[in-house]
Structures are given as C-alpha cells and as structure tokens.
C-alpha cells in the first residue's frame, strides 16, 4: 500500500492539480496562491475515505480552480470527477496493475480511462521512487539479522511470498544480500 501511495503522489497527483496556482476572489480582492492540494492528498491516498472530500469546504476550492480556466482547470475537473464519482479505488487498481507490469517489463502505463489519464512509467522512474524505501529495507534486514544473532552468511533460505517482493529492485536487493538463497513461494 505504501508503494501504491508513493506512486499516486508522484504520478497521479500532478494530474489532479498538485502544484497548480489557485486564484480566487476574497472580499473583492484577487488572491493567488498554490492550490492547497495537501488538504486533499491525505484523503485521496486512503481510497475508502475519499468520499469525505465531497464536503462543501473541499468542493468550493475545486470549483474555484475550475472557474479560473486555463490548463489547470482540466486538472481540477479531473480531481472533481475522481471525488464526485468515487473513483479512488479504480485509480489504485490501475496503479497496482502498472506496478505489477513493472515487475516484468521496463515500462508500464497507469491507465485510468474514467479520468482520461494514461501515464507512462519507466522502470528507472519506478526505481527512483523506491530508492529511499530500498535503503529502509536494507536497514530492516540488518536489524533483523542483529536481533536474531545471525550473520548474513548463516541464513540458509530467504522466502519471497509475493507482494512487494515481486518488484525487480527488491528481488535484486535480496538476491545481492543472500545469493543463491532466495526462493519464491506462494
């Protein structure tokens, strides 16, 4: 789930208005700031609660973004569609499909026709996204070995059981740490 959320932030959020300017009129004065996407993102990343963004305090900000027109308006319309049609689950399904494809191919597409989005993702982009996570995985392996009192050479077998262990860079990390000892098992 964490990797899916990282992919959402990196590849989907920019198409929903993250980083866009937000122009609105307050007390007769025109104010321009960055759109407060962070208020939305936490709820968007947890698809079962995305529906809560249908509240007026969120929808009015999106309407302001749509009304300002320009290239950003399309992104805000996409955000509005995602929320009003409760499409978050479909978005995460598309992310998972692309992530699975990247386990066996050098490129994948996050395809979300409901939002008119087709976002290519290359394996180097995906690996870059996982760079910090791989450091954490290495640290967790070191901590686990330290707690067990075993040296790395004393490990006889490492079992990969699907999920994130299917990701190429994670497989490579395990294979490099435990050469010839890593097996896949359901």
Image (cartoon, rainbow, N blue to C red):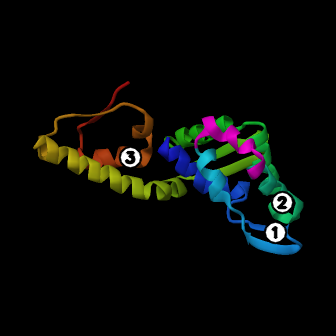
Q: Nearer the viewer, residue 104 or 47?
A: 47
Look at mark 3 in the image and give the residue it sits on: 170
Whether residue 68 is visible, yes or no, is yes
Horizontal arrangement in the rendering, residue 40 relative to residue 123 (left or right): right
Look at mark 1 in the image and give the residue it sits on: 23
Q: How many marks?
A: 3
Q: Residue at x 83, y 59 (%)?
A: 64
Q: Residues within 10 Å of mark 3 (few under 14, many from 20)?
A: many
Check contact, mark 2 vs mark 1: CB within 8 A.
yes
Horizontal arrangement in the rendering, residue 86 relative to residue 64 (left or right): left
Q: Bounds of the magenta span?
A: 46-57
- Asked if the stretch drawn in magenta spans residue 47, the answer is yes
Residue 11's x, y, as percent? 62, 54
**3D distance between C-alphas at marks 3 and 2:** 43 Å
Residue 82's x, y, as percent? 74, 43
Q: Residue at x 72, y 37 (%)?
A: 87
Whether residue 106 is visible, yes or no, is no
- Considering only order in the chain, which callout, 2 or 3, is on the residue closer to the N terminus? 2
- Asked if the stretch drawn in magenta spans residue 135, the answer is no
Numbered badge on residue 184? none
Q: Mark 2: which secondary structure?
A: helix
Look at mark 2 in the image and give the residue it sits on: 64
**3D distance between C-alphas at marks 2 and 1:** 7 Å
Residue 185's x, y, as percent? 34, 26
């Amino acid at each position: 789930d964490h990797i899916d959320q990282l992919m959402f932030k990196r590849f989907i959020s920019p198409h929903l208005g993250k980083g866009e300017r937000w122009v609105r009129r307050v007390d007769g004065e025109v104010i321009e700031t960055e759109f407060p996407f962070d208020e939305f993102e936490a709820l968007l990343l947890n698809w079962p609660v995305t529906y809560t963004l249908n509240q007026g305090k969120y929808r009015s900000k999106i309407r302001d973004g749509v009304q300002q027109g320009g290239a950003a308006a399309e992104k805000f319309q996409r955000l509005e569609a995602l929320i009003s049609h409760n499409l978050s689950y479909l978005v995460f399904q598309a992310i998972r499909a692309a992530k699975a494809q990247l386990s066996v191919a050098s490129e994948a597409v996050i395809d979300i026709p409901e939002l008119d989005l087709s976002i290519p993702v290359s394996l180097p982009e995906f690996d870059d996204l996982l760079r910090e996570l791989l450091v954490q995985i290495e640290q967790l392996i070191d901590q686990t070995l330290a707690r067990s009192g075993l040296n790395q050479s004393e490990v006889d077998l490492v079992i990969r059981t699907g999920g994130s262990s299917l990701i190429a860079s994670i497989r490579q990390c395990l294979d490099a740490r435990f050469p010839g000892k890593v097996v896949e098992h359901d």
